Amino acid sequence: MHLFLLYYAAHLTFEGIPITTVAKHDQVTAMQPSRTDARAMALLSTLFFMWGFLTCLNDILIPHLKNIFDLNYAEVLLVQFAFFSSYFVFSMPSGRIVERIGYARSMVVGLLTMATGALLFVPAAAIPSFPLFLTALIVLAAGMTVLQTSANPYVAILGPPETASSRLNLTQAFNSLGTTLAPKFGSLLILAAAAVPLSIAAMHQMSAAQLHAYRVQQASSVKTPYIGLAIALAILAAVVALFKLPAIQYAQAHAGAHESIWGHRRLVLGAVAIFVYVGAEVAIGSFITNYFNHPDIGNLPLDQAAGYLQYYWGGAMVGRFVGSGLLQRMKAQSLLGFNAVAAALLVTASMLTLGHVAMWTILLIGLFNSIMFPTIFTLAIEGLGPLTGKGSGLLVAAIVGGAIIPELQGLIADRVGIHHAFVLPVLCYAYIAFYAHKIANRPANQPPSPA
């Protein structure tokens, strides 16, 4: 049977291109295809949805854990620091995993690791322990790093190079669908399911036993959602394991290329752009609930304020679907520059106003965030050829900006107030506009010459 499958695969064609087999991974291998595999894109879009959903649940955890453990902004934003610093720590090991076992198996490893991290939320809530919550987030993010290191470049090279940015924007739109649905899910099953939070003054008047009982009661609302997510991730891992994704020879055949990636300025500047983009996007999302809870902005209860996150992430989803079409008609760097300037102006407007104007200008930023990550990613790896794997590893490592910039904004908020702490995202968007301008006038990365 195994020999028959090898013989059968050897005579197939992939999107009109002859394909061969590679015994090392028992996968179909092809040069970069001239058309996109729709079935593979559909499956990959599901993966993008799941990691977007889980990432955005952090925005619900932040106000919830802040109240449970009586934390200030800098302390509670260790949630994002633990989560996104894992991208930096695990990006290079993830790249080696992809090189060793291939894209498809790496996706399975990533999903199972994420399921393990989700299950760790159960003991973290039962104790309850803030350090154990952070540990669960680190394990969850480690799996997500493997998933991103394999899935992002795979989508970029799954079809013609000229539509790579459009293709990655389309899958990222499903990522944004996950981030749009997660706040509603988290608000109903975590914030609303918990008892009405007590004031800090009331908590300080409790005995140690009463405080522990209160924290156990509040933290218990986290258990059921994360158990369900762990089951969903395990099922998705099984589906990916059974689905025969075509392996792209363009990226894998020369995975051991030894040339340094640091000489490719477009890539290196792109890594900085990914760093500040993820940092700004995560910082804004992390602060929205507390921002709208502020008396001068929305004066909303935490569960109602969290509901507005769906508009921030929903704007990103709409923008990515629209952007996927626009990028087939205009230069990627031009659209990136326009969106970066628009986002910077909207953050500034929110800082200078109060009430509903401040609320809706900050929410509208999601629409302009939309195409930034996938567009920067594809521009940065364009032309790398056999260095694509190493380049994508560097870009995934740069996601650590989501750990550092929100923490810095938390420190600023503790000193000058939450309203004016948004100056940091303004600087981030200014750099992205600079990157888009520089890219417009520079040639693509040049792949290394064959030895």
Image (cartoon, rainbow, N blue to C red):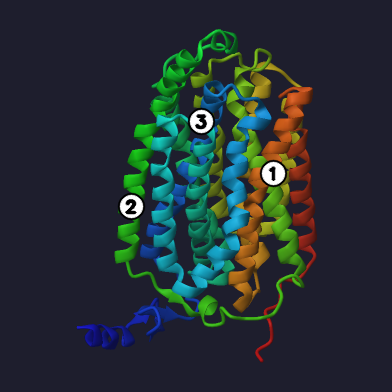
SS at mark 1?
Answer: helix
Quarter of the image with the N terminus is bottom left
Mark 2 or mark 3: whose residue is earlier in sequence = 3
SS at mark 2?
Answer: helix
Place of residue 87 in the rendered image (x, y in percent of width and height, measured from the top left): 59, 53
Q: What residue does disc 2 label?
A: 234
Tell me the residue at 58%/60% (across/down): 91
Query: Residue at the left extreme?
Result: 1
Q: What residue does disc 3 label?
A: 60
Q: Taking the image as drawn, is residue 325 in sight?
A: yes
Amino acid carrying mark 3 in the image: Ile
Amino acid carrying mark 2 in the image: Ala
Query: Is the C-beta separation of discs 3 and 1 under 8 Å?
Result: no
Place of residue 307 in the rendered image (x, y in percent of width and height, measured from the top left): 49, 25
The answer to whether 163 appears left or right of 400 in the picture is left
Q: CA distance from mark 3 to mark 1?
A: 19 Å
Place of residue 162 in the rendered image (x, y in percent of width and height, measured from the top left): 58, 69
Place of residue 68 in the rendered image (x, y in percent of width and height, measured from the top left): 52, 22
Q: CA distance from mark 2 to mark 3?
A: 23 Å
Quarter of the image with the C terminus is bottom right
Q: What residue does disc 1 label?
A: 404
Q: Is residue 182 above or below residue 24?
A: above
Query: Residue at the front extreme?
Result: 208
Query: Is the C-beta separation of discs 2 and 3 under 8 Å?
Result: no
